[in-house]
Image: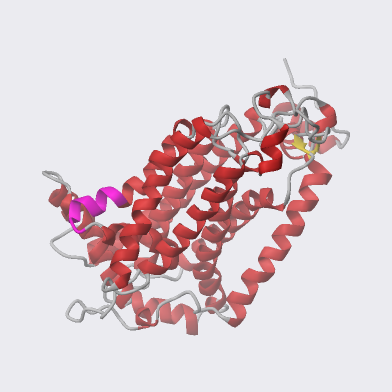
């Protein structure tokens, strides 16, 4: 039976009756009910999607000019900058776009942490989001190697060597990654192929993530479910206009870096051709890897550091079950709210520690910050979820918080509100 299209345009109706793509788009991006109290933090999902598109388009254009050969890679990047029409713009858009992409995704993740977007029924949405983060990190690391400067070469050497700490299979993994017995031309070819491929895998996971959101519904700052049509508005024009405004502001900030401070987030050593015979005085990854780099260095044992670094990301998969509180949003969790901000400061501290030489006070601060990171998720969240008495929840998004709140927070009292 043919699909009955509701569109009046004859061309669109003809296509839609055979392939209902326009009906699907209208359902997902026009009629989709959005909680009417969402704020601008919810726009960072759309911002991340725009940045992903920019990264893929600029990456394809750069790949047409790049030469993945250890003897020519550095010079091919310089040729892109100097001789290719608008090559400098493509390269700066791509390199700064990676940083801005991580900014958007990190804000998106911390928004989810604050408002409890990982709780039932959104566990799979959250887990797919963490898969997106892992794919981003792998793609970004491989892309960082491609300019074949000093920092690219030695970052590849250090990070790939970490796998050698894995018992039994570690050395074969490192040899496979290198394509030989040291970082060289086969390594560069592998990383270029994977760097080009993974963004398309990333698109697939992002589509799954978005589809899962639209199936279970979008969370909101109050962290309560929609009680009816009075609690929601159509995605367009209400949420879409808000997203477009946020995207425009974000792109202006992005443009400031591209045109006025294009090398602000880069490392000067990467403008020196890779030299296996000269080790940089301080090997440091891009800023968005620095917190994980600090966790790696905080553990004296090599294998322990690798486990801690990967564990700091993998632990996020278990978050829906580590948080034992029945209330989603930190808005109604006054005690945990303080610990959330402490976690954010802890991650910023880890990032700064990762940028410093591993000596003196920075070693102790890195270890303390790493301890709190795992303590927050493994100990604090399960215990505090059981002990904390949340504030009363409103009965619905449309109804303000009244004395006593809604039935979900029947255990909370008005005196709890006064104490908070």
> Is 65 rendered above or below residue 230?
below
Q: Residue furthest top?
A: 1
Q: Give residue 310's position: percent from left, percent from top.
A: 32, 48
Coloring scheme used: secondary structure
Q: Is residue 85 above or below residue 68?
A: below
Q: Residue at x 75, y 37 (%)?
A: 34
- In the foreground, 148 or 216: 216
60 on left or right of 253: left
Whether residue 417 is visible: yes
User: In the image as oriented, which residue stretches furthest toward the left?
Assistant: 168
Residue at the (42%, 81%) spot, across then down: 78
Residue farthest to the right, as pictured: 8
Residue 178 visible in the picture: no
Quadrant housing the C terminus: top right
Looking at the rendering, in which quadrant would you find the N terminus?
Answer: top right
| Coordinates of residue 373 in the picture (x, y in percent) | 40, 51
Indicate the position of residue 30 as horizontal and vertical percent values.
Answer: 78, 39
Question: Residue 65 lies in what quarter of the image?
Answer: bottom left
Front residue of this view, candidates 380 and 173: 380
Residue 141 percent coordinates (x, y):
37, 60
Residue 91 in the figure: left or right of residue 191 = right
Q: Magenta: predominant secondary structure element?
A: helix
In magenta stretch: residue 304? yes
Give the extent of the magenta segment: 300-308
Q: Nearer the viewer, residue 29 or 40?
A: 40
Number of numbered tags placed on the structure image: 0
As for residue 100 lying within the magenta part, the answer is no
């Amino acid at each position: 039976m043919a699909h009955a299209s509701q569109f009046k345009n004859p061309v669109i109706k003809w296509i839609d009756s055979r392939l209902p793509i326009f009906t699907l788009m209208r359902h997902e991006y026009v009629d989709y009910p959005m909680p009417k109290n969402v704020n601008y933090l919810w726009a960072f999902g759309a911002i991340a999607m725009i940045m992903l598109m920019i990264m893929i388009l600029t990456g394809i254009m750069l790949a047409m000019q790049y030469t993945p050969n250890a003897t020519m890679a550095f010079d091919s990047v310089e040729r892109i900058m100097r001789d290719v029409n608008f090559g400098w713009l493509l390269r700066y858009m791509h390199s700064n776009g990676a940083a801005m992409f991580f900014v958007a995704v990190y804000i998106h993740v911390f928004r989810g942490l604050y408002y409890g977007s990982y709780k039932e029924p959104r566990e799979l949405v959250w887990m797919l989001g963490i898969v997106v983060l892992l794919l981003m990190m792998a793609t970004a690391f491989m892309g960082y190697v491609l300019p074949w400067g000093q920092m690219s070469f030695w970052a590849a050497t250090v990070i790939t060597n970490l796998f050698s700490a894995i018992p039994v299979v570690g050395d074969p993994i490192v040899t496979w990654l290198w394509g030989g017995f040291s970082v060289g031309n086969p390594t560069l070819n592998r990383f270029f192929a994977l760097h080009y491929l993974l963004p398309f895998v990333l698109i697939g996971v992002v589509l799954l993530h978005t589809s899962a959101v639209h199936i279970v519904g979008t969370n909101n700052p109050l962290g309560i479910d929609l009680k009816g049509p009075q609690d929601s508005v159509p995605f367009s024009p209400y949420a879409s206009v808000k997203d477009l405004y946020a995207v425009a502001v974000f792109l202006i900030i992005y443009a400031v870096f591209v045109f006025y401070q294009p090398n602000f987030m880069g490392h000067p050593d990467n403008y020196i051709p890779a030299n296996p015979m000269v080790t940089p005085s301080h090997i440091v990854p891009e800023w968005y890897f620095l917190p994980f780099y600090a966790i790696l260095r905080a553990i004296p044992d090599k294998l322990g550091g690798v486990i801690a670094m990967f564990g700091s990301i993998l632990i996020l998969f278990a978050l829906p079950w580590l948080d034992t509180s029945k209330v989603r949003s930190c808005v109604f969790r006054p005690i945990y709210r303080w610990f959330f901000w402490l976690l954010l400061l802890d991650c910023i501290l880890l990032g700064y520690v990762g940028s410093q030489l591993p000596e003196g006070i920075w070693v102790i601060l890195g270890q303390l910050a790493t301890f709190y990171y795992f303590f927050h998720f493994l100990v604090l969240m399960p215990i505090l979820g059981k002990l904390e008495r949340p504030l009363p929840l409103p009965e619905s998004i449309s109804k303000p918080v009244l004395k006593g709140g809604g039935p979900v927070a029947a255990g909370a009292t008005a005196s709890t509100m006064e104490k908070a």
